[in-house]
Amino acid sequence: MDIIEHMSAKEHISRNIMMHIGKYTEETVPYYHSHEFLEIQYVISGSGKQIIDGIEFDVSKGNVSFTNFVTRHSFVSAGKEDPIVVFNCIFFPEYFENLDFDSGSASAKKLIYDSKLFMMPYFSLRDEDNALYSILDMMHNEYVREDSAYENVIRGYFIALINVIGRLYKKQTGDMPFIVADADINKAIMYIEKHYKEKIRLETLAKIALLSPNYFCAKFKEATNTTVINYINKKRMREICRLLRDTNESFSDISMSVGYTNINYIRNLFKKEFGESPAEYRKRTKG
């Protein structure tokens, strides 16, 4: 399935709090898209399918999912008489960094920075007791009303949201992995997270995981639903987008700073991924 649109953060996250939360009704045909922000999606009512990176999942009331940076996805309602209605909570990765983790919220900080749960391409859960629905509903009400100090209230709810997601993930999977449940692959992923700005050789990753290169590639794809190269490229691309938005560095300098030496290659890769050149992206999103 071809991508229909790469959604702009500037068009969807218009406030200074670097977050948007809305309620949307999904169509009966796929709207396959990706975006430069992170998204938590909650099915409030209806039923149908969710397609993530080409994989279809049956969804109904109480399904909650997370899709990462440039992960292609879409909801498809089963019918017009009972369409899927969702809460969409979207935010920049930097939103995590701006949260105040003092005063007893260390567990949320640990979940975000140590477990790396939100570095996964995607994951899906069931909200068995409506805990996540209650939090998202309160966040949505605050976002719509914009009462005094609503930004701070939303941040507090968001920390609760992250903790409850972590609790459900642990309960429903039996584990709280760094990124994936496979310990061998986790070691390689953590190496990528730390060294993505350097040249990373497949042989090095395979050695870290104590696997042959071919078997490592197969296990990596099984564990993460993407290839090693795509995982590294997405990690680097997210940093490129951030630097294009937040700095005045040239695209060449930015590309080299995240580990690319072939500027033409990454320029073409960027345009293929986002449908626009780095210069066009910077002009559209900066400021």
Image (tube, helix red, strand yellow):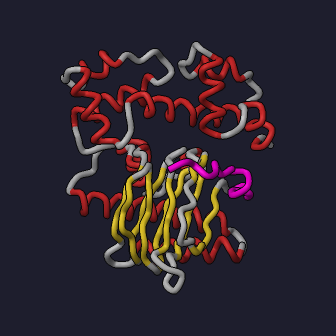
Measuring from the top left, give residue 173's x and y in whole percent: 24, 57
Q: Is residue 131 left or right of residue 81?
A: left
Measuring from the top left, give residue 78's x and y in whole percent: 45, 76
Compared to residue 257, the image places residue 144 above or below, namely: below
- Give residue 285's quadrant in the image: top right
Q: Quadrant of the C terminus?
A: top right
Measuring from the top left, give residue 220's x and y in whole percent: 30, 34
Q: Is residue 258 left or right of residue 285?
A: left
* Residue at 55% across, 52% down: 100
Asked if residue 239 can be seen in this view, the reply is yes
Q: Is residue 86 left or right of residue 281?
A: left
Tell me how many marks there are.
Answer: 0
Asked if residue 178 can be seen in this view, the reply is no
**Is-magenta flag for residue 20?**
no
**Is-magenta flag for residue 9?**
yes
Q: Is residue 258 left or right of residue 231?
A: right
Compared to residue 143, the image places residue 92 above or below, namely: above
The one nearer the camera, 261 or 110, is: 261
Measuring from the top left, give residue 30's x and y in whole percent: 53, 62
The one nearer the camera, 97 or 55, is: 55
Compared to residue 233, the image places residue 175 above or below, namely: below
* Residue at 47% across, 57% down: 103
The residue at the far bottom in this view is 81
Compared to residue 226, the image places residue 248 above or below, namely: above
* Residue at 56% across, 52% down: 99
* Residue at 37% across, 16% down: 201
The magenta region covers 1-16
